[in-house]
Image: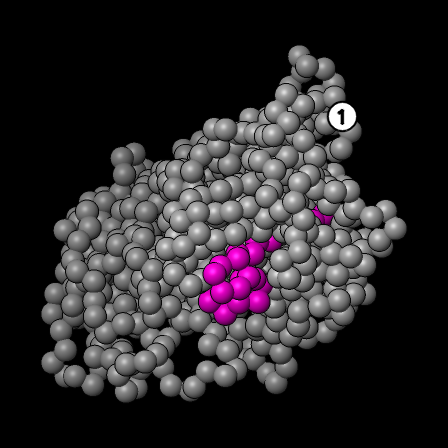
């Protein structure tokens, strides 16, 4: 299924309805500003990556050229960067030689710019540090000169974000602390925006709405203290702050990750935060955060890379907004929020999307993060007990059930027993009279989750009734594949991902999972051409949901391993560790022996009852009731579309991919309208750039 990449229709302003809108952007274009492709053209969808800290109030945005927006909304500026090399000034927004990646899959974004003599690397990430009036979270932006020659670096304040013009006022730079007149500088536009470690060597403004780039390129940047803006200049306004960057040197600025009112700094000095961590340490921290959850080793390196990045982005779904306490002795009030966006004014996450995110976080995340995120669970419940659509109510119950199975703690469900009962009743009504378009299997899944919660709360009779109702709904639910894509615009990635989840819920083939992967950016984010969003967190949620369903289904009779096997996985091995099920944490591995798959499995301690393990995607006839064991299953024919199908004597290779493999050089990407129709250079005949490599990874893993 093709996935939409180009937006059709008019452009909205940044940050919601109060934004300046397209006229302000047209003024920037008319003045010849150096804009990112998504702002310079109407047919390019913005792409960005969310970054931030765990339990932060908001997520910052880093676009695909390194433009950093710490707080999105009307009147809010962004920070860009230019590099002056020996030949000319290089502007990443316009350059061809710009690449981007995540550091270890974490929301630490590294943007690389090619210059004569090597590369200059820009990194942006969130970090906690010394408290400031807006909180204790910062956005760190640093640039490292990896080229063989010294360069000049320009930090550039821009009156736009990745979605459009914001109408920010003229930036100013002032001494951050009277005690250090030659030290850090406070950047404001007009509210405090960030800190520079020292005064710039030169600076430039544009006059009469012009881009300061022209002043910088002409060599006319001023020296000395940054002058005040012209009060009669209507803008748009920009400010370039230049500093030398020697060979191998790194410099950074820090931005406030939450709004800081100007009045908050009238009687308070802001010092440079000396102890903010390095980018590599932050990346390791995100890995440590997800380690307690399930671990998977997949045979497809692109899918493995996407899952690793998605898992590290998933905790950004929980945002914690702290208000000002009435007194110094009181704990500041806090509001928990689950979002698939940046939690800014333009974030339109629905209750149903938040419930999907909670369910994914409960399955994949650590229990402590899920505990905090679940605080917001009852906030979206309606008067009738539902959370919106029946599928949304089912997701809400799945979130509580997944947390209960992963942690063994039914405390949240116990605290909200009336709300849980209301959600179950709402689903029961939907099962009897389903609204048009309702997926009955999603309803059955929600009822099953409700029965699991009731059983954990010692409501045995009620649990049995709800479980029987779920079984009846499941038995009478025919599967219908999504309607084929017509002549209209291709669907957004979130729609394709939703169809993938629905297919896997029914145990049906879901090849469009790889269409979702092909639509990803180099930092494993997805743009939404219908909503003008550059990092749709709902696709991240649904990708993780789909992969969990691909590997395991927690059925009432027992765990179902491999409900459907992707054809390309024939002959390859994979592993799942510590996956939560109602029967305990499950680990299993698949190996191959001459066309026959072997399954090794282990259910954790405390198994109640006698679960029946099955693997219909490998051998529909296989059953097992032991908590631990291994079995050699029946031979699996080579799939027709598998490369080995033409070789009658083909043998499985039995490879197992590592959980986070090196970045693939054949990663499928949109090559653009000017690309030739052939695959990558050197590809064998019949294999395109989107096909996996012919070589297989070596054996390995904890089951070897």
Q: How many marks?
A: 1
Q: Residue at x 71, y 68 (%)?
A: 32
- Residue lying farthest top? 329
Pointer 1 residue: 266
Q: Residue at x 28, y 81 (%)?
A: 682
Q: Is residue 542 left or right of residue 598?
A: right
> Would you say residue 85 sits in the magenta stretch?
yes
What are the residue bounds of the magenta stretch?
A: 75-100
Q: Tell me the quarter of the picture where residue 268 sits.
A: top right
- Residue lying farthest right? 232
- Is 536 or 463 nearer to us in this picture? 536
- Is 73 or 331 nearer to us in this picture? 73
Q: Residues within 10 Å of mark 1 (few under 14, many from 20)?
A: few
> Would you say residue 569 sits in the magenta stretch?
no
Location of residue 370 in the rendering, given as x and y in whole percent from the top left corner: 49, 37
Q: Is residue 226 visible?
A: yes
Q: Residue at x 63, y 21 (%)?
A: 179
């Amino acid at each position: 299924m093709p996935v939409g990449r180009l937006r059709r229709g008019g452009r909205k302003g940044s940050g919601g309805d109060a934004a300046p809108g397209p006229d302000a952007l047209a003024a920037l274009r008319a003045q010849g500003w150096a804009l990112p492709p998504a702002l310079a053209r109407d047919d390019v969808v913005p792409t960005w990556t969310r970054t931030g800290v765990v339990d932060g109030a908001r997520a910052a945005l880093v676009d695909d050229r390194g433009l950093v927006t710490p707080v999105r909304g009307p009147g809010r500026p962004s920070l860009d960067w230019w590099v002056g090399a020996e030949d000319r000034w290089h502007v990443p927004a316009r350059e061809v030689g710009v690449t981007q990646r995540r550091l270890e899959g974490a929301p630490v974004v590294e943007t690389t710019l090619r210059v004569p003599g090597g590369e200059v690397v820009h990194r942006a990430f969130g970090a906690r540090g010394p408290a400031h009036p807006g909180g204790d979270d910062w956005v760190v932006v640093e640039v490292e000169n990896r080229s063989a020659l010294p360069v000049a670096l320009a930090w550039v304040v821009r009156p736009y974000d990745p979605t459009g013009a914001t109408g920010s006022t003229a930036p100013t730079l002032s001494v951050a602390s009277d005690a250090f007149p030659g030290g850090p500088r406070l950047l404001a536009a007009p509210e405090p925006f960030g800190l520079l470690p020292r005064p710039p060597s030169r600076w430039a403004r544009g006059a009469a709405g012009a881009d300061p780039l022209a002043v910088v390129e002409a060599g006319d940047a001023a020296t000395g203290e940054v002058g005040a803006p012209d009060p009669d200049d209507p803008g748009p306004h920009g400010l370039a702050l230049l500093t030398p960057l020697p060979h191998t040197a790194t410099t950074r600025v820090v931005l406030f990750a939450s709004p800081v009112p100007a009045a908050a700094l009238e009687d308070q000095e802001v010092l440079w935060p000396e102890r903010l961590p390095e980018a590599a340490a932050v990346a390791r921290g995100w890995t440590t955060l997800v380690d307690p959850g399930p671990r998977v080793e997949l045979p497809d390196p692109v899918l493995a890379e996407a899952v690793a990045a998605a898992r590290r982005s998933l905790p950004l779904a929980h945002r914690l907004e702290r208000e000002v306490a009435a007194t110094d002795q009181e704990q500041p009030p806090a509001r928990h929020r689950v979002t698939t966006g940046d939690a800014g004014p333009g974030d339109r996450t629905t209750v149903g999307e938040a419930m999907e995110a909670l369910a994914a976080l409960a399955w994949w995340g650590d229990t402590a993060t899920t505990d905090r995120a679940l605080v917001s669970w009852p906030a979206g419940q309606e008067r009738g007990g539902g959370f919106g659509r029946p599928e949304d109510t089912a997701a809400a119950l799945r979130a509580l059930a997944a947390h209960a199975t992963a942690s063994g703690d039914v405390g949240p469900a116990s605290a909200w027993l009336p709300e849980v009962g209301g959600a179950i009743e709402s689903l029961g009504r939907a099962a009897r009279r389903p609204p048009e378009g309702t997926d009955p299997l999603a309803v059955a899944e929600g009822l099953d989750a409700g029965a699991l919660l009731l059983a954990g709360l010692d409501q045995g009779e009620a649990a049995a009734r709800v479980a029987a109702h779920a079984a009846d709904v499941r038995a009478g639910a025919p599967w219908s594949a999504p309607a084929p894509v017509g002549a209209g615009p291709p669907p957004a990635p979130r729609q394709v991902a939703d169809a993938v989840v629905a297919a896997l819920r029914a145990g049906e083939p879901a090849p469009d999972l790889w269409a979702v992967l092909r639509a990803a950016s180099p930092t494993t984010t997805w743009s939404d051409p219908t909503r003008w969003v550059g990092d749709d967190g709902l696709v991240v949620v649904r990708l993780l949901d789909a992969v969990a369903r691909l590997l395991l289904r927690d059925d009432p009779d027992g765990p179902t391993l491999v409900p459907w096997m992707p054809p390309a996985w024939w002959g390859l091995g994979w592993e799942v560790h510590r996956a939560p099920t109602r029967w305990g944490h499950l680990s299993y591995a698949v190996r191959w022996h001459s066309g026959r798959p072997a399954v090794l499995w282990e259910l954790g301690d405390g198994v109640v009852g006698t679960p029946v393990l099955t693997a219909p995607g490998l051998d529909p006839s296989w059953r097992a009731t032991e908590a631990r064991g291994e079995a050699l299953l029946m031979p699996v024919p080579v799939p027709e579309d598998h490369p080995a199908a033409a070789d009658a004597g083909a043998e499985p290779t039995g490879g197992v991919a590592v959980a986070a493999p090196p970045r693939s050089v054949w990663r499928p990407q949109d090559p653009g309208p000017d690309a030739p129709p052939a695959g990558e250079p050197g590809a064998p005949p019949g294999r395109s750039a989107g096909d996996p490599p012919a070589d297989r990874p070596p054996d390995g893993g904890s089951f070897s």
